[in-house]
Each structure stands twice: as C-alpha cells, then as structure tokens.
Image (cartoon, grey):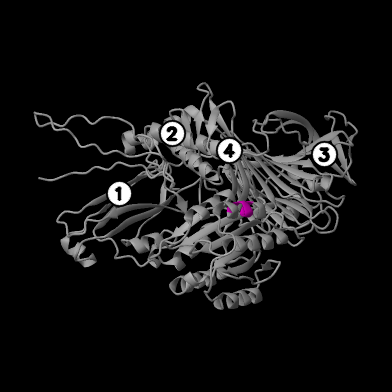
Amino acid sequence: NRAVFLLTYEQLLQRRLGRYRHVTSLRPLQLVSRLSLDVTIADHAPITDLEVLPLQSSRTSSSSANSPSGSKTAGLEGPCSKTIKQQDNVWRITFSPNIVQQARISTSGILGDFVVRYDVQRELGIGDIQVLNGHFVHYFAPKDLPAVPKNVVFVIDTSASMLGAKMRQTKDALFTILKDLRPGDHFNFISFSNKIKVWQPNRLVPVTPLNIRDAKKFIYLLMPTGGTNIDGAIQMGSSVLREYLSGFDSGQNSVSLIIFLTDGRPTIGEVQSATILGNTRSAVQEKFCVFTIGIGNDVDYRLLERMALDNCGMMRRIPEEADASAMLKGFYDEIGTPLLSDIRINYTESTVGYVTQNLFTNYFNGSEIVIAGKLTNASAESLHVQVTASNNDKNIVLETDVPLQHRQLETERRLGFPLGSIAEHFAERVWGFLSVKEGLRARLRSTTTKEREDHIQRATNLSLTYHFLTPLTNMMVEKPVVLADGTMETASNAAPEADETPPAANDLPVLTPVLRLELSIIFLAGKDNRRPAKKPITISKTSADGDPHFVVEFPLSKLTVCFNINGEPGHVLSLVSDHKYSGVTANGKLIGAPAPPGSHKQQRTYFSTITIVADRPKRAYIEVTPRKVILDGRDRIVLPCHSTAAVDSGVLSVAVVGKANVTVTIGGNISFVILLHQYKNPAPYQRDHLGFYIGNSKGLSDNCHGLLGQFLHQEVGLAELPVQVGAEPSTVLKVKDRSVPVVHKSRKIYSGTQSVDCWFARNNAAKLIDGQYEDYLMSHMFDTGDWPQGTNRM
C-alpha cells in the first residue's frame, strides 16, 4: 500500500538581483529507495542563466536568496544525479539521488531546499505583456540604463541586544557595502541605543577614499549598549537627510533613502507604534523612502512593515539563525542600484477597467515591476501603454501598442502546450492576487476604521473568489467519505470561508499565482493618459537618404539641388561638421548591397549608422542604427527603435517614434531627423538603412561644413549657357565662384511620400561640393575633425 499526496499551488516568482528563484522543499528525513524530483520551467520568453544551486539548509536557503552566486553560499552539497533538458522555452530539471548518494548528503535523510535560479531574455528597453481571457499581465524590467546617484542614511541599532554575532555580522555587511558605494553617491551613518550618534552631523558626504576610511572607523567603534530609541533614531535620520536635500549640493534627480536596522522593540523615548508611525510620516514628508530590516525574533515586524509601506520602502526579515551579514548585503544589493524614479505606467482608459498599482517611486536594477489589469472593451483591437520615468537628469518616455487578439493567440500558443490547464486563467488570477496584496497593504495603512473595513471586505471577497489562503480566509481539509462500494464521495467544491475575526497577522497571501509569465511591456510618455495623435513630421528637404541621394534646399534662392555620392561600404562620411562653433558633428557610415536587376550600378550603398556628437554644454555621443539608439554621455542609455520612446535632459533630447524615425534636438535650435527604413522580408538587394534630414539648422554657424552642412548658409543661382546651333539648352548652378552643370530632375523623399523637383549635379557632385569625395571621409564614427582650410580642388 502507498499513499500519494498531490499539492497544487501557484506562486508569482519575484525577480531579485536579476534572477527568479524557485524553491522545492525536500524533507523525507530518511533514506528513500526511490526519490525523484522533476522541475519543469516554461516561460513566454527564452530562458537564460539557468542555475541549479547546491542543496540549501534552512539557514543557507534564506541567505542564498540574496546571494548573487550560489557558489558563495555554503549549501549541503551539490545536487547529484541531476539532468537538465531544454526544448524551446521549456527546461526540465530532474534530481534523482540513489540511497548511497542520499547518505553522502546525510545519513538521516535529506533535509533541505532544491533551488533553481534563472532569468529570461528581454527585448531592448521593453518588457512583455501577456493577454488571456479578458485580462493582461505586464512585466517591466528595463536594462541598459545608467545608475541614478543615491543619497543614503544608514540608521543602525546598537542596543545591548545586538551584542555578539548580530553586531559582528552587521559590521561585516556595512564594511562590504561601503566598497559598493558609487562616486556620485552621498551617505551618512547614525547609530542609536539610549543615545543617538551621528557620524557627520547635519550633512551627507560624497564617496571619497578619505570619507570611506573615516566611515569604517566609525563602524568599527560601534559598541552595543543600552535600550532601543526607534522614534528618536528615525527622527534624526530624517532630519539629516531632509536638511541635505534642501541644500544646493543635493542632486535634484538623485534617489534618497533611509536604511533602518534593528533587532528589538522600542524601549526608550516614544514606544507607542501609532505615534512612531505618525512621527515618521511627518519627518519624511514624502521626500524619500524608508527601508526597514529586522533581525531575530524580538522585533515588532508589524511596526517595521507599516513604517516601510507608509514611506515607499519595503521591509526585510532576517531570521535569528540566518547569516545576517549575507542577507544584509543581499538586501542592499537589491536597492543599491536605482535605475529609474517616478515611474508611471498608463493604459488606454477606454480599454482597461481596473489596473493594479501603476505608480512606483523607484525601480532598482535586477528587480521587476508587475502590473495586471482587466480589459473591459471587448471590441478594442489594441492596448496603448505609456511609461514615463526619470533617470538622473533625463526624462524617459516609452510607448507602444499591443495588438490584443494577436497577443492572446501568442500567449495561448506559448503557454498552453507546456502548461495545459494550469495557464488557462493565469492572467486573471495574477490580477486577483496583486489586488489582494494591495488590499492587505492598504489595510495596514488605513487611518480610519471604515477605511480599514472596506479594504478588508474587498480583499476577503477576492480571496474567496479565487480561493486564496490569506490572513482573512481559512483553508478547510475535509475527510473523504467512503461509500459502500469502496469508492469515495466526490469532494465538495465549497470555497474557503471568511474568518469571522481576521487575525492580526500581516502576512500577504500564502497561496499565490504560480507562473513567472513574461509579457510584452509598453511604456508611455507624457502626463496625459490619452494616446497622442500622430502628427506628420515637418522637416526641411535638406537630407541624405536612399542610395544615398542628397537633397539641399536653398530657401533664400528658392532652389533645390540634388546629387549622389557613390561611396564604398565601410566609409564614414561627414554630413555636418560644426565642432569648433556650435559643437555639433554628424557622420554617416555606408553599408553595401547588390544592385537590383537591370541597374547600371554594380552595387548600392546606404547609411547603416548615423552618429551625432554634441560637445556643449557637456559632450554626448548619439549612435543611431535601424534597430537601436545609443545615447552615451555621462551615462549610457539604449533605446529600441521598434517602440516609441523619448529621453530629455534639457539641452539634449532624443525622441523615437517606433519603426518610423528618431529626432535629435540640441539646444532647442538644432535638430536632426533620422528616418528608419526597415524591411520585414528584404530582397537580396535591400538592406535596413537610415535617412538623415536636417530639421532645424538655426543653431549651426556660418562656418558649418560637411556634405550637407556647407550649403546651409549659402545662396546659389541658375544661369542659362548660350545655346549653340544644334545643341540642347544647358543650365549651370552658380555656387560660390564655381559653375556646376545641372539638369532638372524629380526625386522622392520622406520614405517616398513626397516628390521634390531639384537641379541634379552629376559626377559625384564634382565642383558642387568643396574639395573632393576623399575630403569627407572620416577616420571613425565619432571623428570631429575640422574641414581642411582651402578652396575647391578641381
């Protein structure tokens, strides 16, 4: 005889330090003749960086959750007899140790956690949205963003209860954290017990070798003694940080936070939790976030959790037996690299009925924002998503449209086969789970009885609807009834009943939705939820596009001139050169392609890359390809070209209209528009390429040069040459002191949407341009070399 127990549960995996972590508890506590564990991971996106950790004991398991590498964690022993198989986006891991292998781990049987960590491949700059049965889930985990400087105050408990291992491990963690502070950060330390000591009174200091050395000395001399003045410590930390932020030295776009650590309850000063929470809110004034850490079993975790929730932070619990040093360092790693602040994610109001939390104070590297919503408009063809955020001194805007029907079919195809019925209602259940979490957190923040009861009622109703086990519901296990024929009576489908007296525990739902399902995300710009109307771009005709075909507009002369440049693949051409005066340079790199059938050319060339260097007020480099835009200055930001995005740092802004164009604006009076030519199914002679258009040249100097720049402030004229007997009339263009033969032509610009009549100069623009073709070849993409002084060499 044997008994088979089946436990089906769902869990929404949290992404920490760039990985998801799935834990299976193995507790046979005896040697088992046949022990086998199968873990199947299926995801919407390709799975990357999959890692099976050594078996974790209860102590090391919690520590390794915050360890970047499993090898740094002292597990029981590496999993033996494990096999890993991959098929598309599905990975299968099997762990099947025989009795001898189990005995090597422990003679009394395995007692540990089998841990698998992994991440998924993400599209550039955008997350993933999945749509299923009238609901959607949106995962947002941007990358390729520079870290935002932070202002951090560490508030450390040095009461007598911290004596011994707690204090030693805390010091070890702080020494390590000091090494990880970045040059742009500012910091301070405060210790508290009966007395409160501030390392650097009334200020935060920059990260310098001298300040790091002095901070280490302060940490080394910390001595546990006395009681626990939590209220006084938070007030002091808030005062120091608030005063720094009000000064001229603080960065306006930095991220500010307090990291508060204690192992006990308040015993000195104010000891009433409600008063401490009110004092904290008044001191913080929504100017920064408070992150709280509790060590051991004597902590008022309800107070710490409420303090963090009230002030845009989060709370972390460190068990008494855990490695506090590793967990403290891991927690700091999670919040130590802010990438975005003031994140707002909006969706089409007429399409979405209810969305879970969509405003976030900060986004930290390696984490993930998950939003779920109800789709209320069944006839809607697409969902418009808009994300706005700040990165240091830049405002970032991303947006895109999600085709709902196509995305639902894609979600069903990618998840339905490997997961079967498990995935049928996952999007709706994720929405329900996140809604319950919000209700429970809102309950903690409630200031009135009615408000608290409303949140409890809503969370209870959702818990019952989706059969979630929460602090507000009970799970009932019914003993099956054996019928006369030996069969069992069908179990009732009764939902769990609401607890008449909800417990005071603050735990969030225990049973939670089970998949980490990737979605396609969309970010939006602007403060308006409405979708912005697409306006046609209005730019000058002065451009280099296609083969490449150059067009130059002379407004004063009311003439348009065009010419071709037959370059070689790999050549970098100077388009605009004004480095000495306005500080702006634009270059283009050529790529080759076979000529189409019937062409008189052997090959064609196009611009594969456009680079722009802006030297004022600070040097910045912009590199545009048909697939991505790289903005590299003090920080580096990568934007995809398939979705709409914008980065604005005041003097310099870059705006991408997905699959259409990129606009670079410098100083408000110089702008370039780069058209994106992309082919879904290119012919052999087609290549994805770029078109370069000058939108605004008012800020470029009269001395500007380059293949296009030299004509921006010129005037030209036309002249008819005397007609000889039997010859066709001929026209010349007067440029400076040169006469250039031209013929009348029509040329298409703006991706073929407009035609322009122009005077065409043959022979690779001989005599039209200053010098020769070779004079416009640059040594590399960001070459700002000045135009050689002299006249046209003919």
What x and y, as percent, mark residue 232? Answer: 62, 63
Q: If you read the primary sequence from the N terminus, does the residue marked by circle 2 or circle 4 appear first? A: 2
Label 4 and label 1: CA atoms lie apart by 41 Å
What x and y, as percent, mark residue 406? Answer: 47, 29
What's the mark number on residue 462?
Answer: 2
User: In this picture, which residue range is highlighted in magenta?
Assistant: 277-281
Label 1 and label 3: CA atoms lie apart by 75 Å
Q: If you read the primary sequence from the N terminus, does the residue marked by circle 1 or circle 3 appear first? A: 1
**Residue hosting label 1:** 39
Few, some or many C-alpha atoms within 10 Å of disc 2 (few <14, some 14-19, many ≥20)? some
Residue shown at the point (58%, 68%) measured from the top left: 192
Q: Is residue 637 visible?
A: no
- Picture mark count: 4
Label 3 and label 2: CA atoms lie apart by 79 Å
**Residue hosting label 4:** 678
* Kind of element beneath mark 4: loop
Looking at the image, residue 700 lies above or below residue 209: above
> Could you tell me the amino acid type at mark 3?
Pro
Quarter of the image with the N terminus in it? top left
Q: Nearer the viewer, residue 654 or 263?
A: 263
Depth check, mark 2 against mark 1: the one in front is 2
Depth check, mark 3 against mark 2: the one in front is 2
Depth check, mark 4 against mark 3: the one in front is 4
Looking at the image, residue 407 lies above or below residue 142: above
What's the mark number on residue 741?
Answer: 3
